[in-house]
Structure formats: C-alpha cells, structure tokens
Image (tube, helix red, strand yellow):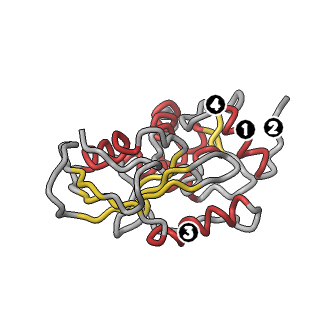
Amino acid sequence: MARVASRRARRGARVSVGASGTVATAHGEAWRWCVHDTWLGPLLLCASARGLVHAGLRVDDPSALLSNLARRAGREASCVESRADLAPALLQLDEYFAGRRMVFDHPLDAIGGAFDQRVWELERRIPLGSTRTYGDLAREIGLPGAARAVGGATGRNPLLLFVPCHRVVSSTGLGGFSAQGGAATKARLLSFEGVLLAT
C-alpha cells in the first residue's frame, strides 16, 4: 500500500502512488494535496495538473484514499503535500463557507465512469439554495427509470461541494449522503445554503 505523509508528518513529504496502489519511483503525474480546516470539518483536497481529483471530509488515512484514486484512474502519480499549489481551491472554499461564493468554478479532474460524469455535470449546475431529486436527474439524462443509478453515482462523487451532490435529495426526504456525518452533514449544508428542510 502506498503511503502519503499524514498531517503529523513534515510538510513537503513525498511519495509516489502507482496505478497498482504500490509505491513507485518518482515519475508520472504530479498530484498536490493538503488538509484544510473549515467549520464543517477538515477537508482533504488533492489535485492533478488538470484540476481537483478529490475533496472530502475523510482525512484519517490519506495514504489509502490517494492510492485508491490513482488505482481507479489507472494513473501513476507522485503526491506532494502543498497548500500553495491548492491555494485557488482553498480560497473558493473559504469564500463559500463565509457566504461569499455561490458557484465553484475551479477546474476539476473527477475520476469516474461515463455515467458518473454525466450525473456530476448535472449536479454542478444545481444552483445554491436549490435542490433536485434523483428522479429529476435521471429524467434529465434521458433515463427516467434510473433514479437508483443516479443515487449510486451521487454517492461516488469524489468532490464534495465542488460537485454539490448534497443538493440532490430523494422524493420523500433528504436521501442518503456518503460524506462523513451522513444525512446530518447534508442537512447542515442545505440549511447553510438557505434550503428549507421539512421537519
């Protein structure tokens, strides 16, 4: 298993994450990562030269997470902790959490299949303060019976907030949420964005 420096390790610690999830020599893509504190909790961010590949609340084991990302993408990446390289994404997060940003427009390099990508693109278009149901998105894709599949793609979203999957709800309530904290985190985000939740 490839290992990535933890928050307790010195800044700039470097390893290589091979497509197989094993430590490799330092070549291939250069990915940058850091942990950023927010009122929602610490967020782990990772970016390639193309854009963000991950933003999420689960930061206990960056090693396993980044190894899995590289393996799923079939890509080899040298991972370096660097807040400076992620500064534009961190700024957008700070603006959002301060109530000053309505749209995330940072470049993304989301890792997922073709169906997942279609769902995530639709989710990026959901305005702040609005929601859609899984069925709504299935109909927009042209597969009205695929609400469950949309839910699966939503659960695989690797880019919390930058792809606002928390704005997708079920027809009978909040629906699930794969980020740490589950439905409570989803409700907290929607409330912050001014969505009135049924009691």
Q: Of callouts 1 and 3, which one flags the residue occurring earlier in the amino acid sequence?
A: 3
User: Left or right: where does residue 145 sit relative to residue 14?
Assistant: right
> In the picture shown, does residue 25 fall above or below 197?
below
Q: Residue 16 at x, y = what percent?
A: 23, 55
Where 184 falls versus 84 (above or below)?
above
Tell me the residue at 50%/30% (across/down): 148
Residue identifier under label 4: 175
> Dividing the picture into quarters, in which one does residue 82 lie?
bottom left
Task: Kindly identify the residue that appears in the image at 17 percent across and 64 percent down.
Answer: 27
Mark 4–mark 3 Cα distance, whole angstroms, equals: 26 Å
Check disc 1 and report the residue beneath it: 187
Neighbor class of circle 4 (other Cα within 10 Å; few <14, some 14-19, many 20+) is some
* Residue matched to label 3: 105
- Mark closest to the chain's N terminus, 4 or 2: 4
Q: Confirm or deny contact between disc 2 and disc 3 (CB under 8 A).
A: no
Of callouts 4 and 1, the N-terminal one: 4
Mark 2 to mark 1: distance in Å? 8 Å
